[in-house]
Image: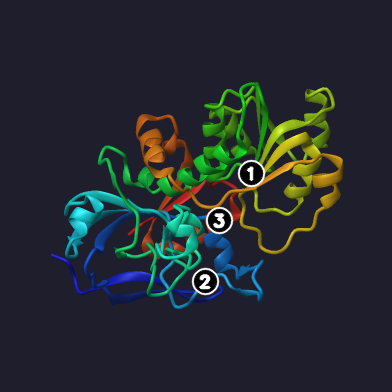
Amino acid sequence: MIPRTMRSVRVYGPEDYRLEEIPVPQIGPGEVLVRVLATGICASDVKTFLGARVWGSAEIQPYIEAPVTPGHEFVGEVVALGEGAAEKHGLRVGDWAISEQIVPCWQCRFCRRGQYWMCQQHDIYGFKKDRAEGSWAEYMRFPANAINHVVPKDLPPEQAALIEPMACAIHAVERGDIQLGDVVVVAGMGPIGLGMLQVARLKGPSLLVALDMKPHRLELACQLGADLAIDVSDGDAVQRILDLTDGYGCDVYIEATGAGPAVAQGLQMLRRLGTFVEFSVHAGPVAVDWSIIGDVKELNIHGAHLGPYSYPLAIDYLRNGVLNGAALVSHRLPLDKYLEAIEIAHRGDESIKVILEP
């Protein structure tokens, strides 16, 4: 029986997150209600908690619309279906399901072209109040416009919560257009960077290099397929890559650190005509020498946002062990320990992926 109320973390502002008892969402036609089984803490969740704001629009705006329930990495058990939802989404009560992190409007120019991850309205779970409430709660609603997928029940819930970040990893690697024999560098060995590393391995690079500043993450990177792991705080990482490539530089550089210096580092590390993939959410603008991009190296600069068309593959890879989900989940805490979980994720000294279990 579905209760009338539930526990939910609610965001009211930077560092003002509260565990409250609120009504369980009501669903309408085409909508889905799930009981949240597991939900992850993303780097963007940490930055939002600390007060990150949106850059790149006409005005600097809050990164999140409060009050709202955060959380966009999750898996849930279907407990109710609105009229027509079963047929529309291919779901049944009792199924485990995930919803892609963006709820498209299906009306803007991008949605009409199939580029739904760039939807102009851009309702992402956990960031838009009312329209796309997130998963740091006991129950959540999938709106009628959402893109949903069935999750096999032999995939542990804490690993199923990795489907969203692994879909992001797959999309970013695809944007890198890695060719057989390429030298590939992935900067940032957080959960998504480690996912990128494993996916990039499938592309047949001649040398796959992991960059980070945390020894335990670099050690894990080697276990998950890196040929070389470099601590960027210990010596000149750029020179090491140049030395390994006869002075040319790497073919593909994927930036997944969220740290400004990693952008300039990548531009210096890439060979002429190389490819730079920018995935991270940065806390503020990052300045670089644009002449390197154009006049000096004529680089290919690709952004990577969300995980479009990558969820079925992420589910399959996690289920079959192509992506080692168990190695990425370092901490599991109950929902009421959300502040401790945010702090663990923020420090990153021992953590990889922190999971909340409502």
User: Which secondary structure lies at badge 2?
Assistant: loop
What x and y, as percent, mark residue 338? 44, 63
Instruction: Give the amino acid at mark 1.
Output: Gly
Q: Residue at x 51, y 60 (%)?
A: 342
Instruction: Give the amino acid at mark 3.
Output: Ala
Write down the quadrant of residue 324 in the picture: top left
Q: Which mark is residue 64?
A: 2
Mark earlier in primary sequence (1, 2): 2
User: Which secondary structure lies at badge 3?
Assistant: helix
Q: Are marks 1 and 3 in contact (CB under 8 Å)?
A: no
CA distance separating discs 1 and 3: 12 Å
Q: Quadrant of the N terminus?
A: bottom left
Where does label 1 land, which residue?
Answer: 188
Instruction: Give the amino acid at mark 2.
Output: Ile
Mark earlier in primary sequence (3, 2): 3
Q: Are marks 3 and 2 in contact (CB under 8 Å)?
A: no
Instruction: Using a 10 Å C-alpha cutoff, classify the residue at mark 3 as few (fewer than 14 neighbours), some (14 to 19) or many (20 or more).
Output: many
Q: Is residue 294 above or below residue 184?
A: below
Relative placement, left or right, of 252 versus 103 is: right
Q: Is residue 70 above or below residue 16?
A: above
Q: Is residue 303 above or below residue 18?
A: above
Where does label 3 land, which residue?
Answer: 43
Q: Residue at x 38, y 75 (%)?
A: 130
Mark earlier in primary sequence (1, 3): 3
Q: Residue at x 41, y 61 (%)?
A: 104
